[in-house]
Image (tube, rainbow, N blue to C red):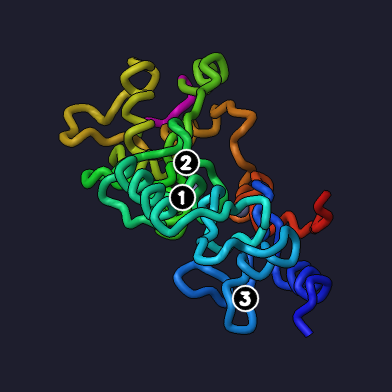
């Protein structure tokens, strides 16, 4: 039988509580809403925990997470009021469908606050943190250096070493130089700009080329504590940073006072 106790037990088994207190439905959803026994799951839990829903009333998700079945996150409202609220949300975020416009966190749980919200040329929001991760992953896959990675040279050490450099042999372009150093050509170009005279290109080379042996020696003079040690993969770094948020907190509190 569908007693309130039974519904409450089902909720524990079929949801995961996320960082925002939403009880997120883990079974299949339709248009974002969870269903159980052919009924909308959030309506069932509301009745099981809070009591009957007034006839003809809709439940408005105040948390804007459709899959959420936390009865404290919904409010019974008339269909007209529900619609009016939905329209108000859409007007705040032109270019987005209502269920997207209502999102206050991205799929991975990053907040859509001022700092983390980017807008594409249509005015649509995107999650900056997720896009950063995606860029990082793509660059990793393509074997490119991570963006924004800076490097620093121990200039005293370099001053000692550079006199002994044999300026001959194979040469590299700036792009190849950057690849050797594990940084982007942009970062290297910036470094060249700020450190004029530390390393000279091959005489009258156009585009500029550098002696490979000299470049390698310069790279050895790198000082950066945060520089990842060789052999440690990008995945290790990602794991250390702790990506994602929602799926990890699988704790349950279904006690309502
Ligand atoms: Zn919620
Ligand atoms: Zn995100």
Q: Residues within 10 Å of mark 3 (few under 14, many from 20)?
A: few
Q: Residues within 10 Å of mark 2 (few under 14, many from 20)?
A: some
Task: Please state the horizontal and vertical placement of residue 16, each as a whole percent of the image.
Answer: 70, 62
Image side of residue 70 versus residue 165, left or right = right
Q: Give the mark toward the camera: 1 or 2.
A: 1
User: Which residue in the protein does label 1 denote?
Assistant: 103
The CA distance from mark 2 to mark 3 is 25 Å
Picture layout, residue 59 above or below residue 136 = below
User: Is residue 225 among what the camera can see?
Assistant: yes
Front in this rendered view, residue 53 or 244: 53
Q: Earlier in the sequence, mark 1 or mark 3?
A: 3
Q: Earlier in the sequence, mark 2 or mark 3?
A: 3
Q: Describe the element under mark 1 as helix, strand or loop.
A: loop
Numbered label tally: 3
The magenta span reads 163-167
In the image, the residue with mark 3 has its CB under 8 Å from the nearest atom of ligand 1: no
Front in this rendered view, residue 152 or 58: 58
Please name the residue shown 38% across and 24% down the image: 191
Task: Please state the horizontal and vertical placement of residue 37, each as a whole percent of the image.
Answer: 63, 83
The answer to which image quadrant residue 171 occupies is top left
Q: Describe the element under mark 2 as helix, strand or loop.
A: loop
Picture layout, residue 37 above or below residue 16 = below
Q: Are marks 1 and 2 in contact (CB under 8 Å)?
A: yes
Q: Residues within 10 Å of mark 1 (few under 14, many from 20)?
A: some
The CA distance from mark 1 to mark 3 is 20 Å
- The stretch drawn in magenta includes residue 103: no
In the image, the residue with mark 1 has its CB under 8 Å from the nearest atom of ligand 2: no
User: Which residue in the protein does label 2 denote?
Assistant: 112
- The stretch drawn in magenta includes residue 166: yes
User: Which residue in the protein does label 3 denote?
Assistant: 27
Q: Describe the element under mark 3 as helix, strand or loop.
A: loop
């Amino acid at each position: 039988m569908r007693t309130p106790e039974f519904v409450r037990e089902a909720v524990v088994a079929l949801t995961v509580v996320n960082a925002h207190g939403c009880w997120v439905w883990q079974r299949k959803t339709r248009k974002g809403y969870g269903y159980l026994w052919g009924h909308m799951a959030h309506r069932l839990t509301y009745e099981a925990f809070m009591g009957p829903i007034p006839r003809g009333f809709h439940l408005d998700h105040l948390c804007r997470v459709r899959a959420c079945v936390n009865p404290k996150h919904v409010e019974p409202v008339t269909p007209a009021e529900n619609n009016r609220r939905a329209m108000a949300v859409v007007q705040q975020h032109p270019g987005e469908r209502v269920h997207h416009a209502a999102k206050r966190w991205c799929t991975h749980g990053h907040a859509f606050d001022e700092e983390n919200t980017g807008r594409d040329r249509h005015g649509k929001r995107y999650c900056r943190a997720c896009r950063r991760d995606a860029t990082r992953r793509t660059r990793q896959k393509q074997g490119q250096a991570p963006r924004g990675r800076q490097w620093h040279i121990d200039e005293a050490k370099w001053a000692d070493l550079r006199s002994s450099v044999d300026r001959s042999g194979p040469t590299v372009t700036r792009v190849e130089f950057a690849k050797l150093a594990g940084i982007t050509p942009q970062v290297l170009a910036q470094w060249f700009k700020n450190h004029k005279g530390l390393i000279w290109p091959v005489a009258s080379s156009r585009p500029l080329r550098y002696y490979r042996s000299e470049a390698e020696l310069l790279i050895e003079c790198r000082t950066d504590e945060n520089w990842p040690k060789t052999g440690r993969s990008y995945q290790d770094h990602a794991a250390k940073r702790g990506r994602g948020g929602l799926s990890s907190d699988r704790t349950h509190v279904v006690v309502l006072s």
